[in-house]
Amino acid sequence: MIKKIRNYFFAGLAVLIPSVGSLYVFWLLFNFLDGFLSFLIAPIFGRPLPGLGFIVTIFFIFLVGYLTSNFLGRKILGFMNYVFFRVPLLRNVYSSFKQIVDSFMQQNKTAFKKVVMIEYPRKGLYVLGFLTGESRGEVQENTHSDTLNVFVPTSPNPTSGMLVLVPSQEVIFLKMSVEEGLKLIISGGVFSPENNL
């Protein structure tokens, strides 16, 4: 019973944290900018301008996205991460939120190519993993068959795990999407996608 409750709890977190977290951040940013702009604009126009805070919020989000795509922005982002990870209580919340969001965003960077199953830690037991590429160089030269790089994540935190080099003939490819695979892992098996035929 306790295990089921825990699994349902993590399944709920997997669905809510990325969406509600993003909406909450957007709401906080909107309220801050709307209040700040009203304080500046009201004396000039005699009244606040409705909708200005929303427009500035959207522009600000695009601006942050643009800055993080260049060298200076990445340096600023790195400094912010450094600061957040130094504050004791904030570190835990920020780290958890960042890991889950990064996991869902990772599929857009094609780091995880396919969802696969392998027999591990012994024959007859299976674990879910993500194909990250083909083994190359020295790794491939020292194996007896073509091997694939499979990242086997832990549940419910898919950002930690291990890399397993598996002979290609022993990898079972699944039809579920990377997003469905992540949901299955984060939920501890509570979320189970239908067979994608």
Image (tube, rainbow, N blue to C red):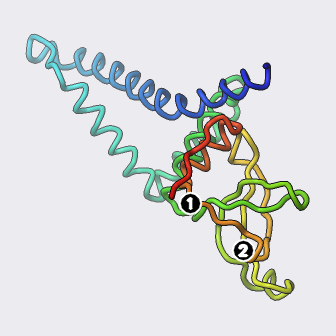
80 over 2 or under it: above or below: below
Q: Are marks 1 and 2 in contact (CB under 8 Å)?
A: no
Q: Nearer the viewer, mark 1 or mark 2?
A: 1
Instruction: Identify the amino acid type marked 2.
Output: Leu
User: Residue at the location (79% across, 19% down)?
Assistant: 1
User: Residue at the location (70% across, 33% down)?
Assistant: 86
Residue 104: x %, y % from top left: 54, 46
Q: Is disc 1 surrounded by few (<14), some (14 to 19) or many (20+) residues within 10 Å?
A: few
Mark number, residue 148:
2
Residue under pointer 1: 175
Residue furthest to the right:
122
Q: Nearer the viewer, residue 103 or 32?
A: 103
Q: Is disc 2 surrounded by few (<14), some (14 to 19) or many (20+) residues within 10 Å?
A: many
User: Residue at the location (51% across, 58% down)?
Assistant: 197
N-term mark: 1 or 2: 2
Residue 116: x %, y % from top left: 67, 61
33 on left or right of 80: left
74 over 97 or under it: above or below: below
Q: Nearer the viewer, residue 46 or 69?
A: 69
Instruction: Identify the amino acid type marked 1.
Output: Lys
Residue 50: x %, y % from top left: 16, 19
CA gap, disc 1 and disc 2: 18 Å
78 over 27 or under it: above or below: below
Q: What element carries label 2?
A: strand
